Structure formats: structure tokens, C-alpha cells
Image (cartoon, rainbow, N blue to C red):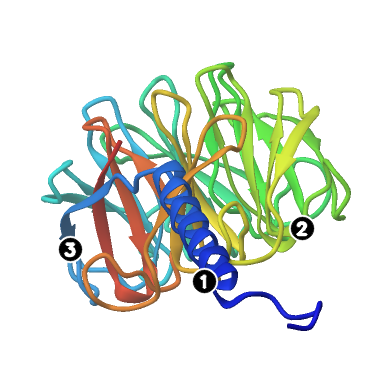
Amino acid sequence: MSQFQIPRQICFLDCCHLIGFLTLTFILCACSLEKVDAELVFIFGEEGVEPGQFKYVEDFAVDGNGNLFITDALNGNVQVFRADGTFVSMFGVAKDTGGLRKPEGIAIDEDGNIHVADYLTGYVEKFSSDYQHMQTYSGYGSVEGKTQETEFMTFHQNGFLYVPEAGNSRISVFDKEGRFQFTFSHKGNAPGELNRPEAIKHNSRGLLYVTDLGNHRIQVFDENGKFLFLWGSEGNGPGQFRKPSGLAIDAEDNVYVAEIGNNRIQKFNSRGKFQYMFGQSGREPGDFGNIHGLVIGSNKLLYVADTANHRVQVFDVR
């Protein structure tokens, strides 16, 4: 036998060892993966202009009674539902005082007043808890105090409203009376810089999480606008993003991120550690199309703006 030949039985044993090793490796990897713990509970909405119907679902807010407020950019209104998807009311239609042209961001202050950001006009319209128009502030522009292409905003524990501006690639901050406070960030791709931010939400510690849509990442700031950390890059793997849009944070400060480009939702802990992901492009229950805003309801369920499918899907996430 040549010195370069390997006995056949040794090859067989080595192959068996290799197969066994690969099998064990697969089992260990599978066991180490986080369980996908998201269950579809119910769906409501369909395409149309009537109460309970949608053309372009954008974002959500939840009031102290657990009612769900939903902005519809193309119908130009805000609709109110109970947590179970039962229609309650509608306001902000164009013919009324404070009428909306393209409402997107919505947030509720500590007094129960509802602030709605209009993407086209730059105005923020303020309504009372019984849906009566109270005030108009800001306006379209790039100077401080004006806003441009406003997106999904949040009222912080400090009483300030944080408004992401896709058009100006910055965050503008107002008090609950509509008085301008300050801005932070600007367009770019360095840490702390933004490119068409889509959503800003805060956690129990007051940290601000921003979906940096154009840079395909999540950035985190303190309440004064100081950059803290970021995670993510462009792609479709775990912890990667394609046009991250909606954002929700649960009571344990876990972060849920929707992606327009991947039509899925990813869950992370507060430091950006990947937990699991679910969803895909499609029209079936559990599928998404042009996914936008997210919110955790008072019932701890996750509400998802399934925009292209003209509906809201609701999941039990743990």
C-alpha cells in the first residue's frame, strides 16, 4: 500500500466521527436559539373609508383607559378602538377644525390630550380627551421649532414630546403646550447621526430608542439628546434591518422593531441583544405588507400596522 493511501476502515470511522460531531453541533445550536414566542390573537380592519376601515395605517397611541388610537395617512383621520378592535370614534377629518391631511405620529400627554403630527403640513394638532380640537403648533420647515415630514413620536416621562423628522433627519422636542424646546442630531451615518428617522419611543428608564430608517439601525439617546449606543446593519439576518420603521417597548424594556424592507418584527432586550423574529411578506394571517407602527397595549398585546393589507394584527408576545 502506498504511503499516500489511507486504509478504508479509517476513512469510514473518521466519517462517522464527523457526522456525529456535525449532528451534535446542530442539536446544540438549535437548543441555543431563542424560542419564537409570538402568537397571532386576532385581526381587525379592511380596506375602505368607513369607520373601522383603513387605507394606510401608520402608528398607534394608547390612552389611560386602554383605548387604541390609530392614524390613517390616506384617509386623513384618527380612529379610536377598544383593545378588542371594536370601533369607538373618529376625529381629525379634513372638514373639521384641526383637520388632518396626512397624519402619522400620535402621542398622548399626561393630561390625556392627544397630539397628532401631520406629515404634509408640519403642524402638530392637539385634541382633548373627548376629541375636540384645542391647538395647532409647529409648522412645515427646517428652522428650529418647525418640522418636516414628521413620523412616530413619544411623550417622555419628563413631559416633553419627542418628534422624529424624516425630512430634516433630526428630533425636535416640544412641551405639552406646544412650546419648542430643542433639537438634536442631523443627517449623516456616523454614530448619533440620523438618516430619515421613522420612530422614537422611550423605555422605563427614560432612554430614547430611534429607528434610523435610512441607516438600517437602531440608535439610543438620553432625554437630552446625548448619543449612547446603537446596533444593527443592513441585511435580513438576526439583528440586521432593512428600513426599520415602527417601534414598541414593553414593561420589561424589551424592544420590538418592524421593518418595511423585510416585513417582519424582531425582538431585542434593552441593550440590543437579539431574542427572536417573526413574520414575512404576504397577505395571509401573520404575514405583513409594508409594515409600519407598533404599540404594546394595556393588555400587553402587540398591535401591528399591517399597512399594505389595510389591517391591524394583534399578537401575544412573551
Asked if 87 appears above or below 54 in the picture, the reply is above
The residue pinned by badge 3 equals: 51
Helix, strand or loop for disc 2: loop
Measured Cα–Cα span from mark 2 to mark 3: 35 Å
Label 3 or label 1, whichever comes before in sequence order:
1
Label 2 or label 3, whichever comes before in sequence order:
3
In the picture, the disc for residue 195 is 2
Which residue occupies the foreground of this view, 7 or 52? 7
Asked if 256 appears above or below 160 in the picture, the reply is below
Which residue occupies the foreground of this view, 97 or 146? 146
Measured Cα–Cα span from mark 3 to mark 1: 70 Å
Report which quarter residue 4 is drawn in: bottom right
Report which quarter residue 285 is drawn in: bottom left
Is residue 128 found left or right of 180 in the rendered image?
left
Asked if 32 appears above or below 13 in the picture, the reply is above
Helix, strand or loop for disc 1: helix
Q: Position of residue 141 (x, y in %)?
A: 76, 56
The residue pinned by badge 1 equals: 12
Asked if 245 appears above or below 74 in the picture, the reply is above
Q: Position of residue 121 (x, y in %)?
A: 60, 60
Name the residue furthest front.
1
Q: Position of residue 179 (x, y in %)?
A: 66, 29
Is residue 210 found left or right of 126 in the rendered image?
right
Question: Closer to the observer: label 3 or label 1?
Answer: 1
Measured Cα–Cα span from mark 2 to mark 1: 57 Å
